Image (cartoon, rainbow, N blue to C red):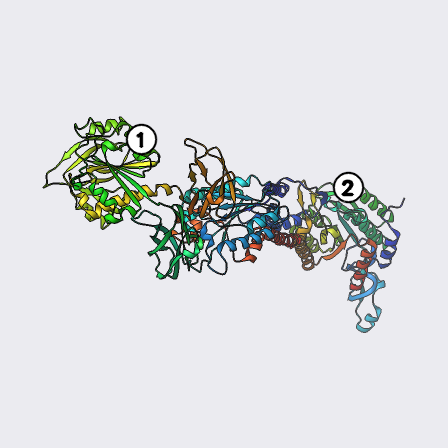
Amino acid sequence: MGFLSPWLLLGGLAVSVPLVLHFFYRARYRKLPWAAMTFLKQSIEQTSRRLRFQEFVLLLLRCAALLLLALALARPTFSGATAGGRGESVDAIFIFDTSYSMTARDGEKTRLERAKDAAATILDNLPGNSTIQIIGCADRAVELGPQSPRNLDQARQIVANLEPTALATDLLPGLTEAYAGLDRGAGTNKEVYVFTDMHKLGWDRQSAAIRGKCEELKQRATLLLVRCGNPERPIRNVGITSITYPNDIPHTGTRMPCAVLLRNTGKESVRNVTVALEVDGKQQEKESETVPEIAPGQAFPVNLTAKLDAAGPRVLTATVTGDDLPGDNRLDRIVSVRETVRVVIVDGRPDFRDPKESAGHYVRNAILPVKSSDVDNYFIRVEAVPADEAGPALLGNCDVCFLLDVPASNADRPGIPGLSREFVDRLSEFVKSGGGLIIGSGENIVPARYNQILGSGGVNLLPFDLEGVSLTTPEKPFKIAPETTDVPSYLERFQQEPFRTVTADADLSKVLNVKPAATGRVLMRLADQKPFLCSRTVGDGEVIFIAGSMDDKWGNWPSKTGSFLSFIDMTLTHFSSKAARGANVTAGDPIVWTPLDATKNFDLMRPDGKRVKLGKASGVPPVVTASDTPLAGVYRILADNQDVKAAPQFCVSPNLSETDDLTDLTNSEVEQILGFKPVFLEAGTPEGIATERAKREWTVWVLLALFALALGESVWAWFCGKAW
Amino acid sequence: MISTLLQPDILARAEALGVAARQIVEGMRVGDHKSPFRGFSVEFVQHREYVPGDDIRHIDWKSYGRSERYTIKQYEQETNYTAHMVVDGSNSMRYGEGTTNKLEYAKLLVASLSYVIVKQRDAVDLRLFDSKWRAELPASSQMNHVNVICRTLEEAQPAEKTGTGPLLEQLAERVSRRGIICLVTDGFDEVEPLLKGLRYLRFRGHEVILFHILHRDEIEFPLDGNVRFVDLEGAEELMTRPHLLRPAYLRAIEAYLKEVEKGCDTGGVEYVRMVTDKPVRVALGEYLIKRLQRG
């Protein structure tokens, strides 16, 4: 219970007046000499107890009447210390849940449309001189206006133009913003409306903090939760989880096979789901397929192809239709399409007479899984050179470099050429600028020299410093343990079949030991926990070190094609897709881009066509950061006067955690989280919303009670005044 | 100088009606009232044998002619009476303003009665009392005695509380000849001793009349507002709102009046209630008429 004018409760002190009068006031008595005193005393004896009782009751009634009067003047309300009543101006704050679950259509209207209707009704019923603040809230709060809190027309316009985001629900930021907004209202009568579908995620993510914030809000305002969902109708939802193009580097001139992964996150089967995939929005090349039915909880991959015409970053867009929730029915991904992928293999043991004996034989064959006649037309171009021919120029036009059993310098193994100093320096630059380096072990590697030149003593490319070689017997070979694959990593599929078994089947006779440190990461280990595959990110590039050899000298892993080929393929795809990394983000995450010319001013072009000023690049290296990414779709960052089509693209996908669980909380569950009962409203009942404020103030009832009490007091006083 | 207590309009009416004794009285001389003694007057009562010493003028010769025996005719003796005016002069009689003051009313009543009684050649004495006898005047049938009575009444000032019962018993002892006892009081005393005293007077053969003088307020209790009642016969004070007590008060006083009235009735005492808002002329006139009618 609260009061609109709590200071008027002080009027209750007036109850002391009848008390003082009753106990201390000496009325003026007319003196009358009297003869028949005996009879007077007899009558007093007979009536005094009754009179005292009557007067006591009368006193109680009068005190109660004064208390009720003070209560009525203080204007009591059912909820909140500052709950509004009829006629009282209100400082209202609207928090709109703009997460994309609000786009669900569980009736004739979407939840957001219902929220808008309810907000309009509330706005229409606000008393004169009321103010309004509107806050959009998904997992972050955005103050939407109006500029002048008294401008209700502008508020209506803002409500009408509200758009959903691709963000997941978290009500805490909105409640926090609303709490801060309470200070902006001058009045004492405050109401905070939360228009939400009561999506479980929004309450669960930070339930303790939400409870605390709502407690604080309750102290200063009335908290009203407007339920916008239709609790009687469950949502049918199929969302696009991902678009993958497994085991292939996107390249021009082909229809790239893609897997569009669908998932039914609702509680009902969804039938006749149509999935389509297009590239760069080209409708005519769109490929689609209809799925007859997806059961609740089922993940369903749909295999489609995308025609990649031109090299460069391309936008793959998958769409799905046939459910109630459109927010996760579209997924855009940037893929970096290559015309050619250039690979350099520096072979430490070249054998031109018998190429099979070369250190790079298996790698080359793995990279080029085509006939000799088709090698020249294949999109991956491989150049294998001995170490003494590996010069800095070799890396000029290269994407990935293999160092296979190469001595770190000419002095490492007498008679066997090693890497030149110039090449090592260029190699370092190559990696830092985004190139991929794969180092395979072998007899030519001298650990100390490697550490000195390529490791911690040199250009710092090795994930870890090398130690010595470990040998084993043929009876007890080293075994690769694919189950130790680090997750997440591009190799995580090695934990699954069929990669797992075939990899575990490989035997190794020798491995190079490394000294694990914080500089790198172990991607896969041997059965005895020795690191086998290690990686290190250097600048924009990455280095992969293999503790075994990439030929058959130290084991049979390269001959296990299911494992070795997959490793090479995944690694090349991983390196090739580096260019698209950072271009695909989840809604709400910042887009970070390193421009070539950092001196210009940049703008962000959002999917809805709005331009947001980003300013100049900052930091070392200078980057442009766009954190305003609430919508799913394709964003562009434009420099001054730059053509939109030439600007780099970034794809923002919906935050899929929103639809992982589509459960909406019931009122009692919300009460449990909050620890108190807020005012619950249903968005679909305009009459209830319009009259809610009047229902909250019970001054009328108090006045009625006061009237009844006054009437009772009068009757009792008359009764007492009547002599018996 | 004629006393203000003798008001012509009262006296004229009362004088015409007179106060006849309703039972046998014992007077000192011949009067208009029946005496317990036989004498020679107008009313024949009986014959008796002549005895030497009797006046031969009273021998009934007609009877001697019939019976040859000397008989004497006897007649009822008529005598005057003495009215004993016993007036309550206690503090409780002070209640009332102006003509409604109980004591003043009582004085007027007693003076008027005394005048009428003396005027018909009967004797009157006066006793004023409160808790004891305050003034006592001997009986006399002289007209100037009325003036003495009036002066005594005028000078009477209430001082003490009432104590009627024992005084009435004293009075009964003192007055040997049967006469009329007029007790004028408000009776705000203990009822039982009062009635006992009255009964004792009756036992001694007196005609006893209780003039119960009451104020209208005391009977109907029409008071309102906040009132501090101060006891006229004591130091006690009661603060109350009398309208709230009225029913209880009326019940109490009604019970009291009934008890007194019933006590008088059973004791052969004539009970005359006089409310001071009714003028003495009217009240006394009504009483005397009623007395005449009863014979």
Residue A679 x/y as whole percent: 51, 51
Q: Quadrant of the C terminus of chain A?
A: bottom right
Numbered disc 2: secondary structure: loop
- Badge 1 marks a residue whose secondary structure is helix
**Position of residue B282 measured from the top left corner of the image (x, y, whole percent):** 82, 56
**Residue A637 on image: x %, y %:** 47, 41
- B284, A291: nearer the viewer: A291
- Report the Cα–Cα distance between label 2 and label 1: 145 Å
Q: Chain of mark 1?
A: A
Query: Quarter of the image holding residue B24?
Result: bottom right
| Residue at mark 2 | B157
Which quarter of the figure has residue A325? bottom left
Q: Label 2 amino acid?
A: Gln
As shown in the figure, which amino acid type bears the numbered disc 1? Arg
Asked if the residue under mark 1 is in contact with the one under mark 2, i.e. CB atoms within 8 Å, the reply is: no
Q: Residues within 10 Å of mark 1 (few under 14, many from 20)?
A: some
Residue toward you, A165 or B90: A165
Q: Which mark is residue A150?
A: none
| Res A421 visible | yes
Q: Nearer the viewer, mark 2 or mark 1?
A: 1
Task: Quickly name the residue at label 1.
Answer: A426
The residue lying toward the viewer, choosing from B34 and A552, is A552
* Residue found at x 64% / y 51%: A43
Q: Is residue A196 left or right of residue B185?
A: left
